Image (cartoon, coloured by chain):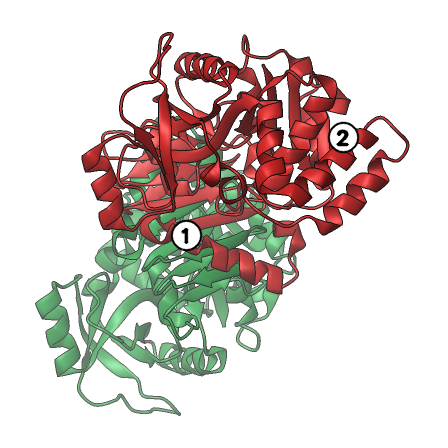
Chain colours: A red, B green
């Protein structure tokens, strides 16, 4: 299986640990000693060799990928001229891999997802590969742990598809937009619904065929790019095509209207670390509900806090439900329930031309 | 007037800005660009020349005093072998100054008090000097701004004493221990009560006479020390006397039972910065009640906080009534109403042998 890792995101919801200059996929957000993109590659051992792993990112992050993933061939690092959402990014990855191997099966994954149970994850990928061999566009369906309103959902259809090797695979009945709270609760009550976290496994020809059917102009551009690969024109063609591409997600552009889509449920401690408070869902907490991600701390009568320290000692005294992050050049102290307002901090820093902190 | 500045305190209530290795009097706690002891000397301009200013401190802090107060003659830095509370420290200062000038008037002040109105303060000191010339043991009485239960009080007696130059001086009826809340409220309602902040102005002979009357053994030791000053025996005599001295406060040991004691009210924005939350009483706060002592901050929907930053940006998001202090090697985040529990942090660091952070 070939793997394409999407690594172009510029997440600031984990500011100050995630920056435009160093997005979370290039940071060791959880203090495991590896950055998120390194951990993403680590857990693919046995699934794909390093020479079969591609990374799609922006020019600004190419060197970071080279530095952090020295085993990946430099030619496997695909640079998007600009971000155009997941549709064109995935199309570009498909064009590169199709050029190399038209019969390839490709796994489209993200560089900033956490998986706690790597063995379970690999089993699910193998099962998804089997479904892709049967020409399914296969999506990993995250088994929902609560009525989350921040993800789109996948509704599976009835009985598992035959033939099922070890794990069940279901036909996808439909993709659903982010629901409201009541709808999300209904999904969980009914069962058979999964979070769509944008991880796809399919034959690369199958995906390109869907582009041709649903996004013909994009497909034409991708075909031109593919033809130019290896030639002296490659860079110019890419730049020209990219200027004219729409910004569109793979979900809206392709998946929602595709036929023969399958879902493989994933129960492996998945988390996309969309915000600081997400970390306490997957990391250990002490008896007072404190989640110490990393760093040296002294906690006095403090409860429900999430702390990511740096080189300094962090002492908490009589506080509750705080997020405290020391990134070296910036400190964040926020209330857990209002931590989404970090974006206001980032906006103010941008207004103040503090690019050094963005 | 001679001045003796008590600078031997090891305050950790302002941890992490105040350390055993660098107590608050040697720090710029309020971000004014001068340490507290430097500000203490600065505001004595016109009251005492640098050659008439003495500092009493411990051996560990002697070099800090030399570094921070280069204008003070090194011989004016009096080192206590051990801390023995304010009684022996003041006695030792009196012995040194009495040796130099038996007719001296001495002002006994603290290195870690903040005075916002230096002009008013100097006027009060001048008035106190006049009272001292009339042989009063004079104490500065801090005009209380609320029913504080953390200070001893001074009860003044009726009408101002004649002759009053510019400012009133009252006889002291009695010294009162730290009151409970109801008693403190009664003091404020009755009027004529002042906080005792341990600042005394008197003839040095008068103070030594009180030692002789009330603490004859201490006086005998002080007399031995004074006799030895300038001789090769000085250090040995000091060490020997100091071993046998009791640890006793000047209030309990001398002031409470002294006769002919006067109080000069001080209304000059006094604060002894006993804890972080005391700073919002004397520093500006913004419209949301935030007191930014120093440092670069971005505040988003945050109220009632007290922030002392260092070289890092501090971002607060949706928090209330917090104290946030970045001292470089340690970060404190505490609730304002529980900030006295800092001592538990210090105790734990001591148990963990983290002398570097104490």
Q: Nearer the viewer, mark 1 or mark 2?
A: 2
What residue is shown at x 49% (from left), y 40% (from top)?
A251
Q: Output the chain of dot 2.
A: A
For marks 1 and 2 on the same chain, the one whose residue lies earlier in the sequence: 2
Q: Disc 1 to disc 2, how far (Cα)?
A: 40 Å
Residue B30 visible to the viewer: no
How crowded pointer 2 is (Cα within 10 Å; few <14, some 14-19, many 20+) is rated as: many
Residue A214 horizontal/vertical position (percent)? 57, 41
Q: Residue B264 occupies which quadrant of the picture?
A: bottom left
Horizontal side, residue B236 vs residue B144: left or right: right
What residue is shown at x 68% (from left), y 45% (from top)?
A217
**Residue A226, numbered label:** 2
Is the same chain shared between marks 1 and 2? yes
How crowded pointer 1 is (Cα within 10 Å; few <14, some 14-19, many 20+) is rated as: some
Quadrant containing the C terminus of chain B in the rendered view: top left
Residue B99 horizontal/vertical position (percent)? 49, 58
Q: Residue A317 occupies which quadrant of the picture?
A: top left
Q: Which residue has dot 1 on it?
A: A340
Q: Nearer the viewer, residue B46 or B153?
A: B153
């Amino acid at each position: 299986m070939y793997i394409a890792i999407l690594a172009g995101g510029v997440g600031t919801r984990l500011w100050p640990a995630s920056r435009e200059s160093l997005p979370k996929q290039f940071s060791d957000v959880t203090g495991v000693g590896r950055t998120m993109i390194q951990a993403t590659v680590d857990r693919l051992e046995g699934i794909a060799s390093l020479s079969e792993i591609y990374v799609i990112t922006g020019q600004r992050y190419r060197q970071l990928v080279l530095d952090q993933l020295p085993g990946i061939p430099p030619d496997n690092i695909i640079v998007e001229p600009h971000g155009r959402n997941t549709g064109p990014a995935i199309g570009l990855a498909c064009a590169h891999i199709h050029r190399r191997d038209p019969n390839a099966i490709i796994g489209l994954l993200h560089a900033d997802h956490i998986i706690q149970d790597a063995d379970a994850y690999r089993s699910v990928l193998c099962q998804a590969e089997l479904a892709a061999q049967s020409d399914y566009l296969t999506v990993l369906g995250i088994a929902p742990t609560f009525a989350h309103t921040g993800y789109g959902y996948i509704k599976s259809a009835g009985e598992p598809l035959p033939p099922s090797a070890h794990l069940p695979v279901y036909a996808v009945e439909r993709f659903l937009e982010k629901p409201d709270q009541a709808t999300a609760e209904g999904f969980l009550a009914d069962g058979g619904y999964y979070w769509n976290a944008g991880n796809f496994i399919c034959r690369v020809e199958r995906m390109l065929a869907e582009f041709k059917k649903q996004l013909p102009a994009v497909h034409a551009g991708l075909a031109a790019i593919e033809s130019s690969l290896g030639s002296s024109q490659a860079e110019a063609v890419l730049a020209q095509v990219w200027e004219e591409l729409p910004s569109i997600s793979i979900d809206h552009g392709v998946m929602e209207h595709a036929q023969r889509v399958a879902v493989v449920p994933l129960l492996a401690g998945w988390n996309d670390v969309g915000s600081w408070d997400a970390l306490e869902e997957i990391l250990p907490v002490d008896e007072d509900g404190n989640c110490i991600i990393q760093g040296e701390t002294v906690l006095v009568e403090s409860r429900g806090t999430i702390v990511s320290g740096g080189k300094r000692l962090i002492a908490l005294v009589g506080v509750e439900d705080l997020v405290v992050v020391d990134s070296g050049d910036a400190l964040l102290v926020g209330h857990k329930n209002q931590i989404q307002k970090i974006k206001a901090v980032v906006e103010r820093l941008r207004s103040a031309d503090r690019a050094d902190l963005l």
